Amino acid sequence: MKKAFSLLAVLVFVLSLGFFYKIFVQDYEQEKNYPSSLTIIIPPKTSAKAIGNLLEKEGIISSQEIFYWSLRLRALGNQLRSGEYHFPERRSLKSVIEKLRRGDVVYHRLTLAEGLTSREIILLVQREEKLQGDVANTILEGSLLPETYTFFRGESRQNIVSQMKKSMEKTLSDLWERYQSKTSLKTKEEVLILASIVEKETALEKERPHIAAVFLNRLKKGMPLQTDPTVIYAFEVLEQKPFERTLTRDDLKVSSPYNTYLIQGLPPGPICHPGKASLEAVLNPLESDDLFFVADGTGGHVFSKTYKEHAQNHNQWRKIKKKKNMVTPK
C-alpha cells in the first residue's frame, strides 16, 4: 500500500512537472499564428495583472493567468513598460513579454519641411495628436533643423522641439567647422540668416549654391540683397499672420529691418528654418560672378552678371508670365 502510494506520488509529480514544463516553458516559447496583428496602448502605472487582462481581452495572449505566473516565475512583473505596442500575427508569450520588458514601443514620424517659419512649426507640432503637452510660443526663427523626427505616443511636444533644436545646433556647428576657413561670413548666425533666404528663394536643391553665390557677391560689393522673401517675412512680422496675397511694388517700400530692398547687408535674423542643403550652399557656394537672377518660368532661375542682362531676362520672364495668365477663348 505504501509502495503504491509512493508510486502514485511520483507519477503525480512527473505529470505535474510535465504539465508545468508544457505550460510555462514549451507553450511560453512556442510561436502561434493569431488572426491578425494588433496594436494596443498600455497606460502608465498599469499593474502586471491589469496588463495581462488587457492583453487577453484584446486577443494578444490566450491566458492572462499563464501570462501573470510566467512573469512571477521569472521575476519580471515590475519590468513591464507602458506605451503603444504593435504585435505581429505570429507571436509567442515570450515575445510579447520581452517586447513589454524592453519597451519596444511604436514610433511615429513627424516631418519638418524646409522653409517653415516658427509660427508654422508651432501649429504643426500642436496638431500632432499623439504628442502631449504644450510647446513654447517663442521658438527662435531658424533654430530648428527641418528633417523627419521619430517619437512615441505620449511624448511631450517640448521634447521633440528640443530634439529639433539640438539637430540644428549640431548640423550648423559641424558645417561651420568644415567650411569656416572658406567663407566670407563672420558668424554662424550670419550663415543661418543667409541660408534662410536661400531656402525661401528656390525649391531646387541644385540651384541653392548658385543663389547663395549671388547673395554673397552682392554682400561683398555692398549691394542690397533685394530679395522678395524678406519683404514677405517683414509683413508677417508686422501683421502677425501669414502673407497670402501677391507682392506689389508698393510692398517693397515697407519700413522694416527685414526689408532687404531698403537695408544694406543681412536682415537682423533668419526668415525661416533652413535645411542642411541651404546651410551648406551658403558655406560652400558655386564659384560665380553673377549678381542677379530671375524666375525662368519652369520653377528655376536665369542668372546674370550685369544689370543689362538681368533686365533682358526680366522682360523675358514678364512675357512668360503674361502668356501663362492669358485665357484661351473657347
Image (cartoon, rainbow, N blue to C red):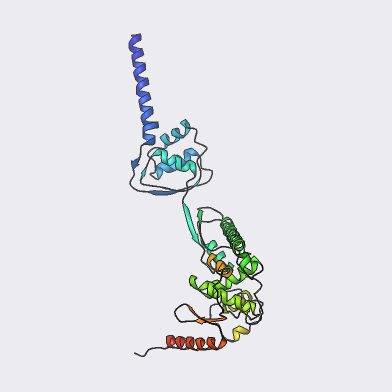
Given residues 71 and 278, the one toward you in this image is 278
The correct choice, above or below, for 7 with respect to 164 in the image is above
**Does the image show residue 140?**
no
Q: Residue at x 36, y 30 (%)?
A: 22
Q: Is residue 203 above or below residue 75?
A: below
Residue 128, image x, y percentages: 51, 60
Asked if residue 62 lies left or right of residue 164, the reply is left
Mark yes or no: residue 213 visible. Answer: yes
- State the residue in front, 317 or 106: 317
Q: Residue at x 36, y 13 (%)?
A: 6
Image quarter in which the C terminus is found: bottom left
Work out whether residue 312 or residue 45 is closer to the camera in this orientation and state it. 312
Give whichever of 319, 81 is nearer the camera: 319
Query: Residue drawn at (36%, 21%), measured in percent from left and top?
Result: 14
Q: Position of residue 235 (x, y in %)?
A: 61, 78
> Residue 299 at x, y = what percent?
46, 77
Report the label total. Answer: 0
- In the image, residue 193 sits, relative to residue 105, either above or below, namely below
